[in-house]
Image: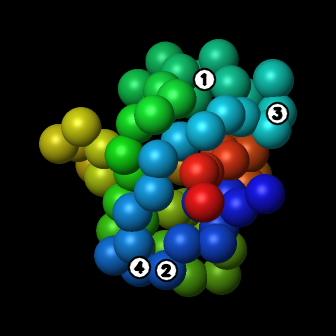
Amino acid sequence: MKTILDLKIGESAKVEKFANDNLSCKLLTMGILPDTKITLVRKAPFGGAYYLKLNGNNIAVRENEAASIIIKE
């Protein structure tokens, strides 16, 4: 299974599902839905936030949240 952590800067993928049920509610509220196209904009240094672009919006998620977003291969 690939996650957001496997993307390189500028790469895009579609969300398949979430690995962590506890975080899925938060991610869904942020607009990260299954089949949503996500582009990795940049990564913060030292394992900080991951900046994502989806539906014309830029959002930041923590590393553990990004690790729970499983993407389609």
Q: Is residue 28 visible?
A: yes
* For marks 1 and 2 on the same chain, the one whose residue lies earlier in the sequence: 2
Q: Tags 3 and 4 in contact by the CB under 8 Å rule?
A: no
Q: Separation of disc 3 and disc 4 at Cα?
A: 24 Å
Instruction: Say which of marks 1 and 3 sits in front.
Output: 3
Q: Find residue 57 and report its image quarter.
A: top left
Give the mark, 3 or 4, whose residue is nearer the N terminus.
4
Is disc 1 placed on a helix, strand or loop?
helix
Residue type for callout 3: Asn
Residue 54 found in image quarter:
top left
Percent x, y of residue 34: 52, 29
Residue at the location (64% across, 72% down)?
6
Residue placed furthest toward the front: 73
Q: Amino acid at mark 4?
A: Ile
Residue designated by label 3: 20
Q: Is residue 34 left or right of residue 2?
A: left
Res 51 visible: no
Q: Are marks 4 and 2 in contact (CB under 8 Å)?
A: yes
Dot 3 alpha-carbon crowd within 10 angstroms: few under 14, some 14 to 19, many 20 or more:
some
* Quadrant, the C terminus: bottom right
Question: The disc labelled 2 sits on which kind of residue?
Answer: Lys
x, y percentage for residue 9? 41, 79
Query: In the rendering, which numbered label is found on residue 9?
Result: 4
Q: Earlier in the sequence, mark 1 or mark 3?
A: 3
In this figure, which residue is indicated by the disc labeled 1? 26
